[in-house]
Image (cartoon, rainbow, N blue to C red):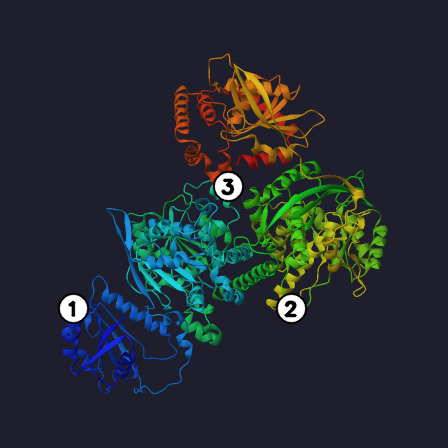
Amino acid sequence: MHSSWFDAPGSRSSHLAIAAANHPLTTCLACFDERSLAFHAIGYAKGSLKPAVIITSSGTAVSNLLPAVVEASEDFLPLLLLTADRPPELQGVGANQSINQINHFGSFVRFFFNLPPPTDLIPVRMVLTTVDSALHWATGSACGPVHLNCPFRDPLDGSPTNWSSNCLNGLDMWMSNAEPFTKYFQVQSHKSSGVTTGQITEVLQVIKEAKKGLLLIGAIHTEDEIWASLLLAKELMWPVVADVLSGVRLRKLFKPFLEKLTPVFVDHLDHALLSDSVRNLIEFDVVIQVGSRITSKRVSQVLEKCFPFAYILVDKHPCRHDPSHLVTHRVQSNIVQFADCVLKSRFPWRRSKLHGHLQALESAIAREISFQISAESSLTEPYVAHMLSKALTSKSALFIGNSMPIRDVDMYGCSSENSSHVVDKMLSAELPCQWIQVTGNRGASGIDGLLSSATGFAVGSKKRVVCVVGDISFLHDTNGLAILKQRIARKPMTILVINNRGGGIFRLLPIAKRTELSVLNQYFYTSHDISIENLCLAHGVRYVHVGTKSELEDALFVPSVEEMDCIVEVESSINANAIVHSTLERFARQAAENSLGIISASSLLHPMIGNVLLCQVSGIQYSQYRVKLCDRPTICSDEFSPFHREGFILSLTLEDGSIGYGEVAPLDSNIENLMDVEGQLQLVLHLVNGAKFSYMLPLLNGSISSWIWSELGITASSIFPSVRCGLEMALLNAMAVRHDSSLLGILHYQKDENGSAQPHSVQICALLDSEGTALEVAYVARKLVEEGFSAIKLKVGRRVNSVQDALVMQEVRRAVGDQIELRADANCRWTFEEATEFGLLVKSCNLKYIEEPVQNKDDLIRFHEETGLPVALDETLDDFEECPLLMLTKYTHPGIVAVVIKPSVVGGFENAALIARWAQKHGKMAVISAAYESGLGLSAYILFASYLEMVNVKASTEQKQGTSPSVAHGLGTYRWLSEDVMMNTLGIFRSPYSGFVEGFVADSSRNLKDVKINNDVIVRTSKGIPVRRYELRVDVDGFSHFIRVHDIGQNAEGSVALFLHGFLGTGEEWIPIMKGISGSARCISVDIPGHGRSRVQSHASETQTAPTFSMEMIAKALYKLIEQITPGKVTIVGYSMGARIALYMALRFSNKIEGAVVVSGSPGLKDPVARKVRSATDDSKARMMVDNGLEIFLENWYNGGLWKSLRNHPHFSKIAASRLLHDDVPSVAKLLSDLSSGRQPSLWEELGIVIQISRSYSERKMSNSSKSLLECTAR
């Protein structure tokens, strides 16, 4: 656009004048009188309606512009004043023609900025954004003069200067066109029409063309804007980085709101950017920022690195919040208006190309940070931030102090998506998404007045506020305690004071590495010994001191009986905090590198689907095996135990033909048995066939648990440990074959940074039973040493008393010498007194450790302190369920030196890796132990043990702890195998190099890559139980009912179970459960009359056109159906509506009903008024279904509070869609009315009989597996 410039000549302004004169799009006019020149420019502005540009030299030349500036200000005329000036070093020192030109025109200009003297150290973008901002103020709604003061250093003649071109970075796009660097837009909403207008067509077009978009959500303060930002995220489907002050960073229950179209929230991008690989990967073409500036410095830095790109900043004020000078499109609008414009533009759905990469990075880093924070036994500042976010609800609010608190919560706070207990939290949710109101004093980011501000925030927000500040910030505002004490018109506050006795943030800054400690202590840390407790006492405010994790959780989670304010002092230290932050950053960087390595390796071989690396299971089967053993396993306590081992081999095929094998080897216990495990395998076959999974599973950081929940729709803890272990083994081995790699290769794919090769073997610990005399046992031990074993574990606790075991151990030590590592395993068999007696007698035997010496786990540490013997955990690990880290915290004592991990008992490789990493973090041995698996399982364990050794070596090297000693793993059970599942030779033998018995990586990898099954040990193979589907006709009350039947299994004893679904369900829903139970009963489910594919037909002779779906009629129809199915009795399993029918039939048709298993069923309503109300309600709903159709009815139906947990199920959309598959909607509506619980007979008086029947039957017939599956289905 052509413009007019008006120049008053002067030496200091020569650069400006020459640039204007040489520009092809300017017309310049010169005049020696600045005042006349300025008024001439006013005339031009009036006539052209364009801003005029005035150039002057320094000194009084600037002052002469004042009359015209006043006129332009009062008449709203746009002027741009470019006034040359002396540089700072010539100000205030008597330099010629130098006056104070800062804010020279006062309030008569709309905008003033004092530019720095030109230098190649400042990016040119800074000048461009400043000029564009000035022009925006000059031409805005309150247009007028703006002033840019421009200091220049000599030389002023335009002679060449040797400048670096780096200051021009990011200007390619700007220099290629005549557009401004930053364009300004306004969006205005007309309330009368509800139409949003504004010149943002260009902005919308930029958004539509984005291929690598990013949405930044900065500080937001209103609920409407938070919801608008969430809807914007859902519409764009770009990766989202939410600042801690956005209210979205600490969100809860988000996925149900977003359903399947889920953008990836990259909550830990700050830590991902610690990796050079991630920084090199990140690349954006469009960034939208809504809300104020963000907290993370690393995110801001990577945006600068990625520039140029289109940067759209949306905020309601007109001010320039652009410290990096990147904004290309500045939209002045509130977020609601902007989101409305975007949503109405109807963008084509297209995921960002970075979606898959960032999703994998976020998942890996979030889980790694969660593990590191949770595994640390001491209370740390990051743990406070992590736990703080979990303690908040939508009814509370958070005020965050500056310096470290806001950075910690931004980095380590967690949303519910990263929690391992999301499902439980979902049950109490009312809204599909809960956001947490978060604020802080980030205007100037000072540390003063924070306590007082937080108290005012509590009054204004009318919420229970949690405030977290540092000790120095707290001391800055101790007078705020006087305001806190008044407690006027607000709810109680909890104020966390992180007391590290000084300014801890400086320990994390580069200055700490270059400054002497004494200087840091005196001038930066400002160390103090002020008593916060005494300050609270002086002001009469309640005070609590916390020094442990449990104490912090009590302070945050346990509701106080007294509704009063509380100051919670959290003890910390500057140095310890620095170490924790450094450790977290190191492991986060490793997690990022691992994730990118997997993505890189996988994407080279296989294409990405929807920007996500996925593979699919095309087939799965299992084979039961029975192998002979040469001796009775040591886990068997009776002499009649069989000399064989039974289990299952899972075979899993991927869509490309890759096959992976896994072993399911249950130990008979109160948790598992062979029959129950096979029942669950049938369920697994049904759920896994056709399932898709991500290449991120080998990270073993919660990725498999998350996949089981999101893809299979069940919680990982509901699967038997041995079944989950076999499933994980098969999945990982299939992925290894697909990648032409090995199990070890995909678990630890990356090259060692020091260039060292992967370990070629792991040491094996022999297992020795203690049967026989002491001399006999010692003889066997000596033979084991001669075979090459460097470590031996002796089973103890099997003799008359522990003294005899001690004598055997002493004899063994004499026989094998001092160089052989000896371990003992008591399997929790001794009392504390017996164990102590043994321990004191074998102190001279130099045991490596003893596993589980006492029956009471609370005595483990006490035993060590009494005897001095090192202790290892084994059976203690079996009791852990979903969160092992919570239980392990009590075993950080140095007397606990090892954990013995059986993957098939703890629930697979993921749980085993978690426990092992915890052990390694606390300097304990992690020993992988077999449970008499076949060669297939042992080969996988050798590779898994090797992986753990590599992880431990790398961690020790990085922490500069020296060489980590190798561990002899408990895989000596191979000696019990008289035959094997595999034809392959097991890779365990005496090494020609070390002379010890070792498990070899190469052999194990070959065995798992090319598995040859020994068919002689295979009992049978199953690809899943087929479902027989057919239709049966029953005639009732003048109508023929054609009932859809689903039939699974045959049972020799004639046991039959009939499954009845709930309202709007079908018999198909029971099929997974029926497959799991079909081993003990023939299982039949039906589409209850009026539902699914069941249909009804009126007899031609009857005048009635529609049947009555009363309880009596439904029961009569099902009774006749049962008569056709079996001559014997059946047990009915019912859910909801089906449960009511089951109760009724168990009472009224006892000749055919053996019992009832009731899930969420009601015996009816007693109160007559309640019955009438319920009947009327159900009649109204039935009419709504007929009038509006089933789809609208379902939408309203599932919005009810009864379905909160179902709405949060990952398969909710699929479940809801299945509810539309009914052939006869009018019959469904009639059944809702006729079978209303307000009309059904009340069964309360007879209920006791049914309860007794149900209890008796469930105890006799229902296995543990079946019960757990039913519980899962009910939820």
Image coordinates for residue 1002, horizontal then vertical, percent: 74, 60
- Callout 3, which amino acid? His
Residue 46 as seen in the image, left or right of residue 12: left
Q: In this view, does 576 lie above or below 825?
A: below
Label 1, secondary structure: give it: helix
Give the position of the N terminus as an image quadrant.
bottom left
Q: Are marks 3 and 1 in contact (CB under 8 Å)?
A: no
Q: Can residue 868 be seen in this view?
A: no
Q: Mark 2 to mark 3: distance in Å?
A: 48 Å
Q: In which quarter of the image is residue 3?
A: bottom left
Image coordinates for residue 851, horizontal then vertical, percent: 70, 51
Q: Mark 3 to mark 1: distance in Å?
A: 65 Å
- Callout 2, which amino acid? Gly
Q: To which residue does mark 3 refer?
A: 1209
Q: Nearer the viewer, residue 950 or 1218?
A: 1218
Q: To which residue does mark 1 refer?
A: 46
- Callout 1, which amino acid? Lys
Image coordinates for residue 912, horizontal then vertical, percent: 64, 52
* Residue 962 numbered tag: 2
